[in-house]
Image: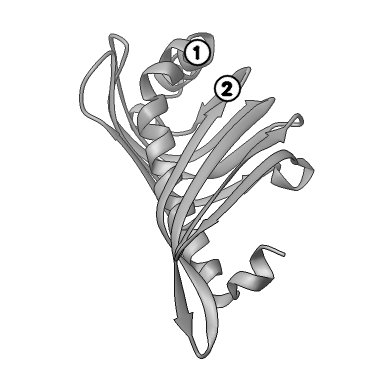
Amino acid sequence: MSSLNIEQGSGAVAVDLHFKDLNIYGFKNGRVPAVKYENAVNVVGTGGRISTPDGITLKGNYKIDGKVLVLPIKGEGKCELSLANVTAEVEIVGKQLTKNGQIYVEVMDFKFTFNTTRLKSKFENLFNGNKELSAQMNVFLNENWNDILQELKPAVQDAFGSAFHEITNRIFAKVPFDSLFL
């Protein structure tokens, strides 16, 4: 993923967090235990649940500025986020389009929600490379991961939903509807 922006301006966690060159690992071991599909006149609705018991890891570059609970946070560098036992749900609503005699789907709405049993994070180069402050902040983030995630979750879900919306539209623009939903 070339970029992902999580912006939360108020509350106990108020941050501007920007990721670049973000690689996501762990979906290949995921399971899709449930999928639903509806097709109305020119409207397509689908959704499903994805489970990754081995977890998901995100690695890339970050830039952050803001506050986490009562502590300021600022930095730019490499990061790694690991989420354990992830379950995610997606809901997609799209409309059918005809191109060159074939039906395609344009995604109009993409909702993404998720849960995890653990989030472990490592941000390098926090506080302009101050190793002591950086280490303390990483410990703080990992000890308080659940409270922090609950505050950030709506913004995180919106950011991933927007990114997946774009990715899904690129796929659906190239693959005819009949090939997607057999």
The foreground one among 93 and 72 is 93
Local SS, label 2: strand
Residue 40: x and y, percent?
49, 58
Cα–Cα gap, marks 2 and 1? 8 Å
Q: Which residue is mark 1?
A: 146
Q: Quadrant of residue 47?
A: top right
Local SS, label 1: helix
| Position of residue 19 in the picture relative to residue 52 (left or right) | left
- Residue 45 is labelled as none
Amino acid at pointer 1: Asn
Q: Within 10 Å of the Cα at label 1, are there few (<14), some (14-19), or many (20+) other Cα atoms?
A: some
**Image point (50%, 60%), residue name:** 167
- Its colouring scheme is one colour
Residue 169: x and y, percent?
47, 64
100 to 56, vertically: above or below: below
Can you say which quadrant of the picture contains the C terminus? Answer: bottom right
**Image point (59%, 34%), residue name:** 88
Q: Which residue is mark 2?
A: 119
The reply to whether the C-beta atoms of the residues labelled 2 and 1 are less than 8 Å apart is yes
Q: Quadrant of residue 43?
A: bottom left
Residue 101: x and y, percent?
53, 89
Q: Within 10 Å of the Cα at label 2, are there few (<14), some (14-19), or many (20+) other Cα atoms?
A: many
